[in-house]
Amino acid sequence: MHAANSYLPKPALMMQLHRCSATKANDGENSWKMSEFTQDRIRNFSIIAHIDHGKSTLADRLLELTGTIKERADNKQVLDKLVVERERGITVKAQTVSMFFEHYGQRYLLNLIDTPMHKDRNVKLGTRFKGHVDFSYEVSRSLAATQGCLLLVDAAQGVQAQTVANFHLAKKQGLKIIPVLNKIDLHGAEIHRVASEVKSLGMAREPLQISAKTRLNIEQILPAVIEYIPPPTGSRTSPFRSLLFDSWYDKYKGVICLMSIKDGVLRQGDKIQSVHSGQKYDVTELGIMHPEQTPTKQLYAGQVGYVVCSMRSASEAKVGDTFARVGSRVEPLPGFEAAKAMVYAGIFPVDTNDFQKLDESIKKLTLNDSSVSVSKETSTALGQGWRLGFLGTLHMDVFRQRLEQEYEANIIVTQPTVPYKVIRKGGNVKYIRNPIEFPSLDDTSRSVAELQEPMVLATMVFPEEYLGSLMDLCGARRGEQVDYGYLDETRVLMKYRLPLAEVVTDFFDELKSRSSGYATFDYEEDGYQKSDLVKMSVLLNSKPVDALSVILHRSQVEFVGRDWVKRLKNVIQRQLFEIIIQTTVGNKVIARETIPPMRKDVTAKLYGGDVTRKMKLLEKQKAGKKRMKKIGNVELPQSAFYDFMGSKTSR
Ligand SMILES: Nc1nc2c(ncn2[C@@H]2O[C@H](COP(=O)(O)OP(=O)(O)OP(=O)(O)O)[C@@H](O)[C@H]2O)c(=O)[nH]1
């Protein structure tokens, strides 16, 4: 049971509560004037939390409390329509929304800015992806639109990896942080323990204690936001300048941008310009999210709203970009980085006839997700396809699942690769996003000064009994311990610097399985590091299979080389002649397997029994014939690649 007594709200807050009341906001077009909200009457904040700690529920409660949406007795998420929309998106947006709230007789404009999360409940990804974020850059740009945040922690589960990572991100940006313990209604809530965990992160402020579900103490939140989080800075009279922190594609209006107005005023009809690309746009509509798009005539410094501005493609809306009036010279806002794909993979249709259809599906999916980079790729083994870049593996998996489930695409996804850096002796730097581009051994010794791989800083939180096993895991994945300590008596907070390439494979699954599901994990980019990298090729009867080459750290070549030939042997059907499968680095053979020549009836190798399996195999073979590729003299159906990519390495 929780012991809430020592954490009762402070008397000062208690006194204000009865004076706070919600303002009915959207009665008609003129129920508010944007000009009324000068910076001192604006607060921009976000809620940061580990997945499932109650962020959406709390957001709903705040919307109810401010009259932005109607209260519902059944506790069901009121933003249902939006929720459905969101859940279909790759970047799940917990909704950026403007609310009006009265405090001590003053009307405030409170903008709750969402931080993007990767989670897609419509696509059944299972628990594998819970608590895993690929978006630290996008989260940091959303936070840049705020001056403070609520750090929401489940009072039963305590601080988790994402809580820690988000806390540090917010702290780095100098934001005011209000800790809030949620779910104090639960029997398992341990308020004292979790409050001290929160403190151990370095937060001086006593946490508020609420139940977003039962609405207990909800009324304390917004007064705390107004009193503790500073108003936005900037000036209405300075030249217009805004930060783009989010965007999506609307089939009627085109690209919709969410912007935080840093200086000046933005009006319908204004001509604005991206500071980074120089592209010019006409503002055709603007307004606030209340909670749906609600047009206004202007947006002033300190305010946050949506802007529709003749942008044709989502790829033009770069998160972190600064916008200014055409012709005006302003300083770009700090922190802009072009969307950075961290994981690349080739995607090919299983049936080459599906190329056109798949091309359209990929176009549709990327329309709403500008962070996926797309280029065409041709493989001798797999035909025409695409090389797609994603923010992380979760992003990639969600994209793949959406292609398969929503667009019924039948695809082969090649082994993911991270962007490696090749530094030439002359100083020239090239990023390698496809193993095909990796320099040959000759080229490397002649002209490459250094090969580097991207690193991440991983944060893990778990019960101490798993410490040994998780340290082993990180060690085996070439990790280097950076930090380690106890959050409380039994739970460990551990940080490792790890190669991204090690994290994008099965690290997360392995972490979950070694910790019986208890470990939580988050990571952020952490620069590049010199690395002993090589390209491993797969040969069938001495001919390389381009789609199967992979860049590896030299220490892993033996293991992966052996594993791959075995797995390939299992998926390649016998042919009338012997097939030799080899993995090689340069001229050196790492491993070899042989598939003996064979008879025509492929099902003969399935001893007796399972008729349906036989039928399936025959059907597969029949279908496969149509799309048989030849690697030298070896016939290889696309389905063999599909099976190989789907089979698992066991470490
Ligand atoms: N008992 C209890 N359950 C709560 C409370 N707040 C939220 N929940 C439940 O916790 C679960 C997760 O809540 P969400 O609001 O979806 O959490 P979230 O942080 O938005 O989760 P993600 O959207 O997955 O990031 C839901 O089943 C909620 O009903 C609370 O105060 N008490």
Image (tube, rainbow, N blue to C red):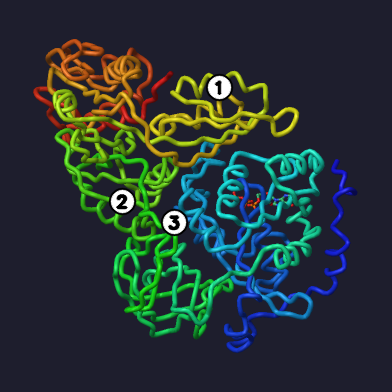
Which of the two marks, 1 or 3, is nearer to us in this view?
A: 3
Q: Which residue appears farthest toward the right when viewing the image?
A: 5
Rendering quarter of residue 471: top right
| Image coords of residue 399 (percent x, y) | 39, 47
Q: Would residue 266 be visible to someone looking at this image?
A: yes
Q: Name the quarter where the C terminus is drawn.
A: top left
In the foreground, 398 or 273: 273
Q: Marks 2 and 1, Cα distance to the nearest angstrom?
A: 34 Å
Q: Earlier in the sequence, mark 2 or mark 1?
A: 2
Q: Which residue is mark 2?
A: 373
Q: Which residue is mark 3?
A: 335
Residue 471, label in figure: 1
**Is 128 displayed left or right of 604 in the figure?**
right
Q: State whether residue 58 is above or below residue 449.
A: below
Amino acid residing under circle 1? Met
Q: Marks 3 and 2, Cα distance to the nearest angstrom?
A: 21 Å
CB-based contact (under 8 Å), mark 3 and mark 2: no
Other-residue count near label 3 (Cα within 10 Å), few / some / many at <14 / 14–19 / ≥20: few
**Is 285 displayed left or right of 430 in the figure?**
right
In the foreground, 242 or 251: 242
